[in-house]
Image (spheres, helix red, strand yellow):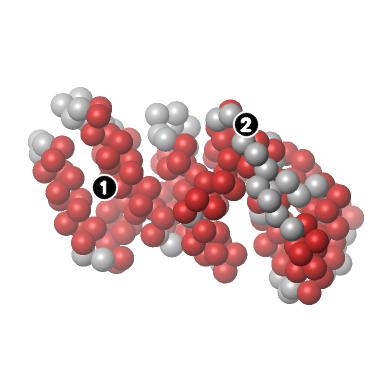
Amino acid sequence: MPTPKERLSHLLELAARGAGERAALAGEVADLLLDWPDAYPTSMRATFESLLEKIVREMDLGARAALAPRFHGRDDVPLTLLNEFFLCAPDEMRAAILARNDAAGATDALPIDSGALLEAARSGKDFAAALARRAVLCKGAGISRATFSAIAILAGPPRPVDESFAMLAAYDRVPANGAMQLLAFWQAGSEPALEAADAA
């Protein structure tokens, strides 16, 4: 069995081969983390977790979506890594990630200009679909339920009443602190993930 240092060297060599190897690299690092060898010191685990976070951040959403379910239900995985999977995780996993963020402690709402967001909703096409997928962003930014509802109504094609209520129900289910934690995480360094999700 290779030593942790040898394993890390191999993975770094694989990383140096470029973006085409990201999925394979992520798979190898995930295999290691999900079945951590007893012979490896636990102090090395954080190095591999950080490496996987960086790799996942560089992967496209499809590749992330394929990898995410492997980490569902794993309490031994750092929240920062799970946050990288949030936008493409299955619904149940997203709920679990939000719950862990919610339990992580209080954080302050991030400043956002609700009026500017409302104006963007009035003038932007396809804004409602992106907003509906991002109830977490609105809740995390401290956007009120009433403003979220107005934005959702103004920003898209007319919808049946039950669909509008479903969007509000999605907003209501999002824990405020969990959403604030995730939004702070994204703003700290994962904005390309949000841009990629909005483009998808």
For the residues carrying marks 2 and 1, which lies nearer the camera in this image? 2
Q: Residue at x 15, y 50 (%)?
A: 10
* Picture quadrant of residue 153: bottom right
Q: Residue at x 43, y 42 (%)?
A: 81
| Furthest-top residue in this view | 38
Residue 28 is marked as 1
User: Is disc 2 in contact with disc 1, using a CB cutoff of under 8 Å?
Assistant: no
> Is 123 in front, or is 35?
123
Q: Which image quadrant: the N terminus?
A: top left
> Is 136 in front, or is 144?
144
Q: Residue at x 15, y 37 (%)?
A: 4
- Helix, strand or loop under label 2: loop
Image check: 117 left or right of 101? right
> Is 100 in front, or is 118?
118
> Is 193 in front, or is 164?
193
The answer to which of marks 2 and 1 sits earlier in the sequence is 1
The residue under label 2 is 106
Residue 112 at what x, y percent from top left?
Answer: 70, 55
Residue 65 at what x, y percent from top left?
Answer: 47, 53
- Helix, strand or loop under label 1: helix
Residue type at mark 2: give it: Ala
Q: Is residue 148 above or below residue 124?
A: above
Label 1 packing within 10 angstroms: few (<14), some (14-19), many (20+) = some
Q: Which image quadrant: the C terminus?
A: bottom right
Residue type at mark 1: give it: Glu
